[in-house]
Image: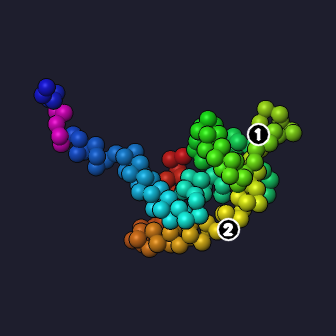
Amino acid sequence: MPAPDGFTFDTTLMVRDRCLCLAAQRAARALARRFDDALRPVGLTSGQFSLLMSLNRPAPPTLGSVATLLAMDRTTLTANLKPLERRGLLSVSQNAEDRRSRLLHLTEAGRSLLEQALPIWLATHDKIDRQLAAFDGKELRGALNALT
């Protein structure tokens, strides 16, 4: 079936070259693979590292606040919490002040694993920063954060 007038392969190339969503998805996947590979020796994925790090706060956060920070829906976050909870890296409790919400606690085992993972994360991040030295990393993060 022929393409409608004006809808050619050039249109596909224009979308590929202009699409911020595609560029962000590709970059996110490439970054996640790098961090997943780096964190594999400590048994974490990049997403698990981010999730556990988001719990490293003076007071246990609510499930909702972590979901917002990680830009995840609650159902996806809950599914991602379960394997970490089974490993004893975090615990979930009911919020005594609001029984409808749950609090997420980083356990000592979780904190210890993050302490092992942090130097790996830093070294990986430093390598990526060097590869992106021609770009302003603070400006790039600011632009990405502006989208959220």
Q: The N terminus lies in which quarter of the figure?
A: top left
- Gap between marks 2 and 1, in whole Å? 25 Å
The picture places residue 145, in percent across and down from the top left corner, at: 54, 52
Q: Is residue 17 magenta?
A: no
The picture places residue 74, in percent across and down from the top left corner, at: 63, 37
Q: Main secondary structure of the magenta part?
A: loop
The picture places residue 104, in percent across and down from the top left corner, at: 74, 47
Tag 1 secondary structure? strand
Residue nearest the observer in this picture, 138 or 28:
28
Which residue is most to the right? Answer: 96
Residue nearest the observer in this picture, 24 or 92:
92
Q: Residues within 10 Å of mark 1 (few under 14, many from 20)?
A: some
Name the residue at 41% across, 57% down: 30
Residue annotated with mark 2: 115
Residue flagged by tag 2: what amino acid is it? Glu
Name the residue at 70% across, 42% down: 63
Left or right: where 96 falls relative to 88: right
Residue flagged by tag 1: what amino acid is it? Arg
Residue annotated with mark 1: 102
